[in-house]
Image: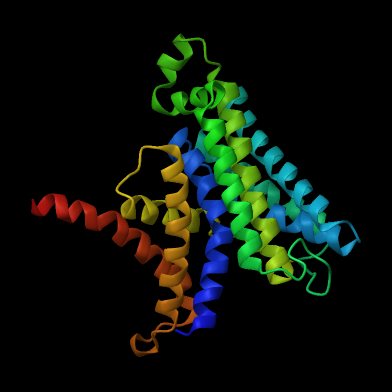
């Protein structure tokens, strides 16, 4: 594995840090297994690519992608809160619908924007993405430390007690899902602009990648309780996951190929979850 491959892993890892943060908000903060992210990641890429190819300012398209992802989260939350549709099923329904929405947005299965202007311009993709990730982490840390943010975190700990204290659990859940999917859509927008294309199938398995980053990050940081440390651990987990994937795919002696990516991902996630339990059993 050479320096170029390591830098590439860091670049993609930073972009997927936002996915990990979005997954952390739903899975860890509000205990909502949201599968919408597979569709909202592609939605972010589709919106920004379609608008850039039409001549729009890349910063405006990125903001539009964030708004579109937020709306996707609202739909999932609405289905769950208003109509009592099971959280897992609500996410699947929105994700399924987003496949057709993304095709409508792009007008075709894929769009190339490699020759179009992007938010990165002539700057380093790693540096620009790092700045966006740091700003996102700081804003979210401040938000979840506020009274409103603490209300969102409370519904994940004990929704019944939260409701007894006057917290509107349904509204908080919808807002959390909206924030989560907006961040994931931002990741999709950055990914499309960094890679120079958007494809209808690019979001497949995004939820697994996000979970892998969260789990690895938590294992490295020993299950952090502070929100800032937890969000930073998402970034660490995302980058380490990408480096591990790159290393595995370059280990030709063990016969792995690029087509084994999903197998490697599942193995890494499973090992990360099993090893701590084996240590506890050994004690």
Q: Is the residue 269 above or below the residue 183 in the image? A: below
- Report which quarter residue 52 is drawn in: bottom right
> So how many labels did they put on this image?
0
Instruction: List the single residue furthest toward the right.
Output: 55
Q: In this view, does 6 lie to the left or right of 177?
A: left
The residue drawn where x is 62% and y is 55% is 131
**Residue farthest to the left, as pictured:** 283
Q: Is residue 38 visible?
A: no
Give residue 65's position: percent from left, percent from top: 74, 49
Q: Where is residue 147 in the image (x, y as percent from the top left)?
A: 53, 21
Give the residue drawn at x 15%, y 49%: 280
Tell me: 27 left or right of 99: left
Is residue 219 found left or right of 249 in the rendered image? left
Give the answer, above or below, for where 224 lies relative to 237: above
Residue 89 at x, y percent in the picture:
54, 39
**Render colour scheme:** rainbow
Residue 278 appears left or right of 20: left
Q: 278 and 56: which one is in front?
A: 56
Residue drawn at point x = 16 percent, y = 54 percent: 279
Q: Is residue 154 visible?
A: yes
Q: x and y percent of residue 111 in the render? A: 79, 68
Looking at this view, is 27 or 125 the one in front?
125
Looking at the figure, which quarter contains the N terminus?
A: bottom left
- At horizontal 59% and vertical 36% (from top left) the residue drawn is 177
For this orientation, the residue located farthest to the bottom is: 253
């Amino acid at each position: 594995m050479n320096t170029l491959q390591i830098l590439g892993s860091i670049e993609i890892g930073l972009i997927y840090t936002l996915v990990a943060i979005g997954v952390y908000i739903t899975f860890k903060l509000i205990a909502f297994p949201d599968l919408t992210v597979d569709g909202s990641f592609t939605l972010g890429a589709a919106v920004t690519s379609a608008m850039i190819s039409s001549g729009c300012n890349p910063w405006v398209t990125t903001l539009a992608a964030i708004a579109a992802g937020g709306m996707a989260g609202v739909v999932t939350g609405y289905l769950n809160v208003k109509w009592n549709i099971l959280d897992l099923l609500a996410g699947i329904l929105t994700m399924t619908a987003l496949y057709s929405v993304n095709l409508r947005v792009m007008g075709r299965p894929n769009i190339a924007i490699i020759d179009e202007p992007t938010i990165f311009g002539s700057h380093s993709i790693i540096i620009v993405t790092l700045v966006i990730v740091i700003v996102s982490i700081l804003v979210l840390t401040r938000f979840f430390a506020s009274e409103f943010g603490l209300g969102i975190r409370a519904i994940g700990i004990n929704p019944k007690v939260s409701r007894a204290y006057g917290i509107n659990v349904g509204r908080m859940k919808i807002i959390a899902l909206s924030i989560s999917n907006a961040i994931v859509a931002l990741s999709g927008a950055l990914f499309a602009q960094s890679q120079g294309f958007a494809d209808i199938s690019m979001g497949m398995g995004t939820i697994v990648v996000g979970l892998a980053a969260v789990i690895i990050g938590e294992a490295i940081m020993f299950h952090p309780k502070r929100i800032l440390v937890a969000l930073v651990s998402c970034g660490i987990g995302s980058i380490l996951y990408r480096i591990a994937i790159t290393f595995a795919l370059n280990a030709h002696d063990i016969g792995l190929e690029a087509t084994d990516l999903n197998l490697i991902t599942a193995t890494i996630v499973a090992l990360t979850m099993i090893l701590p339990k084996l240590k506890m059993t050994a004690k």
